[in-house]
């Protein structure tokens, strides 16, 4: 009789007690071995499934969680442009005001005691500091001490594709930053030797520098140039804008320089949260650093339009009165009127005519009596 066959009752009855006991011990040993093998198999399966189960069920938030919060949660100080944990993509032509807009938002967010980090491979530290100092002079609400505590800009940082994404994001979180700005995508891709036209390369960058931040509730913000032909989207692969829940096109509505005050347009062209079509305007240049404000009147109203409206009654006004009516600062009124007065002389127009370009049409306001002269003469 072999151990691989099951004995019949008659065969068991013929066995002497010692042989029967030996057979019973063999059966017990076999059952124990089978039990051990089953346990080993269960442990091996659990180990193999453990990492997958942890990634899918333990670490990934469930739609049924009770503490998810609002899908659209504006960041304090972000002018409804920056949202908590939601990537934003600002794109526009070179010199359109991308850095100006996002830097201003960053300073204002920092004043709400929220950590902001700018990783800048586009502009040097001296230029960034000059902008910041200029903004602080213009806006007394920007406190230098608080900015030093909650705002930082690092220039020409060296990124590495070999970094562990979780290590990178943990470091950012440990330093207390809740908003991280990358200026610019073109320089960032180039430094990492990735292509702006490759979907895979963009996914690699996003997986390293964006996704791990989002998982920790940190808001990544990207700045990029527009294409040479497709000027309504960022240059290169469409995957850039596809990956971003919020996309904003930056454009120069009225020309601005360090000496001339103008207006930057900010149009939401990409949104998973219902913001497509919303528009903001920001008055900047000539020492002026105003926060972006949403345009609500036919989506085309500018600060200059507001000032013209305040002057249109033909009465004499002081600068402060015009500023209050237009909802802007006295400095803004002074600078814009100076610019318009200089342009009037340059074009040899009648000194009693003020003109502004709006949506391709010339809007002319003829000042009556001493109304305009009072405003100009006070400058």
Image (tube, rainbow, N blue to C red):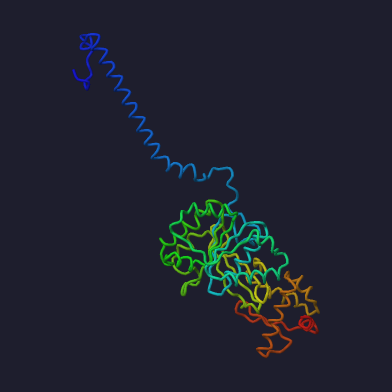
Side of 227 where 285 appears, left or right: right
Q: Position of residue 264 (x, y in %)?
A: 61, 72
**Relative to residue 127, is residue 146 depicted above or below?**
above
Give the left or right position of residue 3, taking residue 250 as reference: left
Where is the C terminus found, in terms of image quarters? bottom right
**Quarter placement of the N terminus:** top left
What percent of the width, then of the height, locates residue 207?
Answer: 46, 56
Relative depth, front residue between 198 and 1: 1
Q: Quadrant of residue 291?
A: bottom right
For this orientation, the residue located farthest to the bottom is 348
Which image quadrant for residue 368? bottom right
For this rendering, which residue is in front, 333 or 179?
179
Instruction: Please identify the quarter of the rendering in which residue 269 is found.
Output: bottom right
Whether 14 is drawn above or below 197: the answer is above
Residue at (69, 85) in percent of width and height: 342
Q: Residue furthest left?
A: 1
Horizontal side of residue 33 vs 345, given as left or right? left
């Amino acid at each position: 009789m072999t151990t691989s066959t099951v004995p019949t009752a008659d065969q068991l009855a013929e066995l002497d007690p010692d042989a029967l006991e030996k057979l019973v011990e063999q059966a017990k040993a076999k059952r124990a071995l089978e039990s051990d093998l089953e346990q080993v198999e269960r442990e091996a399966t659990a180990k193999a499934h453990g990492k997958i189960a942890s990634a899918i069920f333990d670490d990934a938030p469930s739609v049924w969680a009770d503490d998810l919060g609002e899908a659209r949660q504006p960041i304090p100080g972000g002018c409804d442009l920056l949202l908590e944990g939601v990537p934003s993509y600002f794109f526009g032509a070179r010199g359109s005001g991308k850095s100006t807009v996002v830097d201003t938002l960053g300073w204002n967010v920092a004043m709400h005691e929220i950590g902001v980090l700018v990783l800048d491979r586009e502009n040097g530290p001296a230029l960034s500091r000059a902008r910041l100092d200029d903004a602080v002079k213009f806006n007394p609400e920007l406190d230098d001490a608080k900015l030093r505590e909650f705002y930082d800009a690092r220039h020409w940082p060296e990124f590495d594709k070999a970094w562990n994404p979780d290590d990178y994001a943990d470091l950012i979180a440990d330093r207390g930053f809740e908003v991280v700005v990358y200026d610019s995508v073109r320089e960032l891709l180039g430094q990492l030797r990735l292509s702006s036209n490759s979907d895979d390369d963009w996914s690699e960058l996003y997986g390293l520098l964006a996704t791990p931040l989002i998982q920790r509730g940190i808001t990544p913000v990207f700045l990029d140039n527009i294409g040479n032909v497709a000027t309504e989207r960022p240059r290169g692969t469409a995957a850039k804008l596809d990956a971003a829940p919020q996309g904003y096109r930056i454009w120069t509505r009225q020309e601005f320089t360090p000496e001339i005050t103008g207006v930057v347009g900010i149009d939401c062209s990409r949104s998973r949260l219902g913001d497509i079509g919303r528009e903001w305007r920001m008055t900047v240049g000539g020492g002026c650093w105003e926060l972006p404000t949403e345009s609500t009147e036919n989506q085309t109203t500018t600060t200059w339009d507001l000032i013209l409206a305040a002057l249109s009654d033909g009465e004499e006004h002081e600068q402060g009165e015009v500023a209050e009516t237009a909802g802007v600062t006295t400095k803004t009124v002074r600078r814009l009127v100076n610019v318009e007065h200089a342009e009037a002389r340059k074009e040899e127009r009648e000194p009693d005519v003020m003109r502004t370009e709006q949506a391709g049409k010339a809007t002319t306001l003829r000042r009556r009596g001493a109304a305009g002269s009072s405003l100009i003469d006070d400058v």
